[in-house]
Amino acid sequence: MVQRVVIIGAGVSGLASIKCCLEEGLEPTCFEKSHDIGGLWQFMETVEEGRASIYHSVFTNSCKEMMCYPDFPFSEDFPNYMHNSKLQKYIQMFAKHFDLVKYIKFKTFVINIKKNSDFPVTGQWDVVTEKDGKKELHVFDAVMICSGHHVYPNLPVNNFPGLEKFQGSFFHSREYKGPERFKGKKVLVIGLGNSGCDIAVELSNTASQVYISSRSGSWIMSRVWDKGYPWDMVIITRFEAFLRSILPTAITNWLYVKQMNKWFRHEDYGLIPLNRSLMKEPVFNDDLPSRILCGTVQVKPLVKEFTEASAIFEDGTVEENVDVVIFATGYSVAFPFLEESIIKVEENRVPLYKHVFPPHLEKPTLAIIGLIQPLGPIMPTAELQARWATRVFKGLSVLPSESTMVADTIRRNEKRIKWFGTSRSQSIQTDFIEYLDELAAGSGAKPDIFSLLLKDPKLALTIFFGPCSPFQFRLKGPGKWAGARNAILTQRERIIKPTKTRVVNNSSSYTLVSLLTILGLFVLVAAIFLSLGYQ
């Protein structure tokens, strides 16, 4: 019987896993390599081997109402999209509120995880850790790996002939911390993802010129959407997902392209994706189109080769006197503490049942949490993964046969390729609402909209037509939260709260007053003319 669970990593997935273990009566122990919680969101001035790294100016791409833990909303005064330091503060508040830190052993490095000699019977694991140069062996009943997928940089130097003779400097974007040392330099950023665009825009204020090179292009979205609402509060709804499921593919593709081009025509900026109908994760950057308009950022095709001081592109154009090349080329999925017989990485992805469980293990006592890239926020996704995994550990949810699970991984991969393409950067991509519902069904937390229509129609309609926020998955089932209904019905108020920092007249009231004033003037003029006519 599973009781003692080891959790690798104290980032957002690891903290969710600790809490879910406690909710199921399990005994978690978390090993964290660094000195603090937060994982990716724990900013450090220097890059450390074996842990994620972010630059100082990173902001979230998901708004606070969509990315929070489902039973711990952000404070109403927190901004909708926040600086990494603000999110780190929220993570610390979450850990303190649920008293999670006492289960974490900091500055402890996991060296090796392997099956116990009695694994076919007990499902137990031998875990070797190291702290202060001292190694220690532990035995646990189950393992939850929450080490993320932003640790091991993908630096494809062999794909760029001539790079070895390039006289300037080059490095991976994980080493970038800020723009200060690039003043007056010509910088080439390779990669049109979120990091690449962020870095290019930031450098455009200090560098003499910034180029951004892309093989396949990308959709660029603003965080600000219809009527000033956060993009994900408008787009990520059950109603939109329902429409996509019933409309013909040709129509959904047309609507998708139209929606992506709503802000500006990507063709005119050299950004249009090669396959524009793929549901490739868009880039969120509110400033890139402006920087391109101003000429401080130029979009270029893929680099064909480098010379000592130049970059030659596939279209034959050449940019001279390039000082720095930054590779924003993503990361490689890796588990150096696991044998390949346990987890095998194939084409930068791991075939996992529902993106969580290796299908071939004799006992389902190892779960990978957070190794996924949903078209939505990771925190509620990882939390639902952890809730389901802990119930599997307890025997409250039973996995199907190995052959069924393998077939499921194949089907998911085929669907991923159809929706998102074969790009390395989309190797762990998945839909958001459909996947969350699937996980929630496994833990008894999926909202029943039809039942709610009879009992609570206001809530049901808000869930269906409004944003698919995390609170929906704490309305029922294990871990039900009494505040979930109110959190759903008041989420728009929490969005507006931090933006209304200056008291102004209500625009609708102002419009009504203006119309009444105009109508009054019209009546007055008409009365004057009528009175003159009678004289």
Image (cartoon, rainbow, N blue to C red):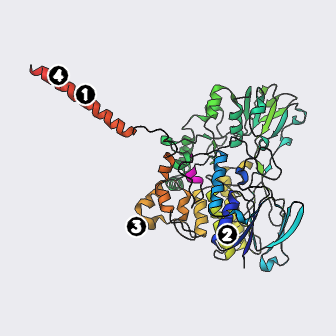
Q: Amino acid at mark 2?
A: Cys
Mark closer to the chain start, 1 or 2: 2
Q: Nearer the viewer, mark 2 or mark 3?
A: 2
Q: Is residue 227 magenta?
A: no
Q: Are marks 2 and 4 in contact (CB under 8 Å)?
A: no
Helix, strand or loop at disc 1?
helix
Q: Are marks 3 and 1 in contact (CB under 8 Å)?
A: no
Please name the residue shown 72% across and 34% down the image: 212
Provide the residue span drawn in magenta. 64-80
Q: Categorize mark 2 by other alpha carbons within 10 Å: few (<14), some (14-19), many (20+).
A: many
What type of secondary structure mainly makes up the magenta span?
loop
What mark, if any, has residue 454 been given in the picture?
Answer: 3
Mark closer to the chain start, 3 or 1: 3
Q: Is residue 66 magenta?
A: yes
Disc 1 from disc 2: Cα separation: 69 Å
Q: Nearer the viewer, mark 2 or mark 4?
A: 2
Label 4 sits on residue: 529
What mark, if any, has residue 21 been given in the picture?
Answer: 2
Q: Amino acid at mark 3?
A: Leu
What mark, if any, has residue 521 been given in the picture?
Answer: 1
What mark, if any, has residue 510 been given in the picture?
Answer: none
Disc 3 from disc 1: Cα separation: 50 Å
Relative to 486, is 415 on the left or the right?
right
Q: Amino acid at mark 4?
A: Phe
Helix, strand or loop at disc 3?
helix
Disc 1 from disc 4: Cα separation: 12 Å
Q: Nearer the viewer, mark 3 or mark 1?
A: 1
Eyeballing the image, is 47 above or below 298? below
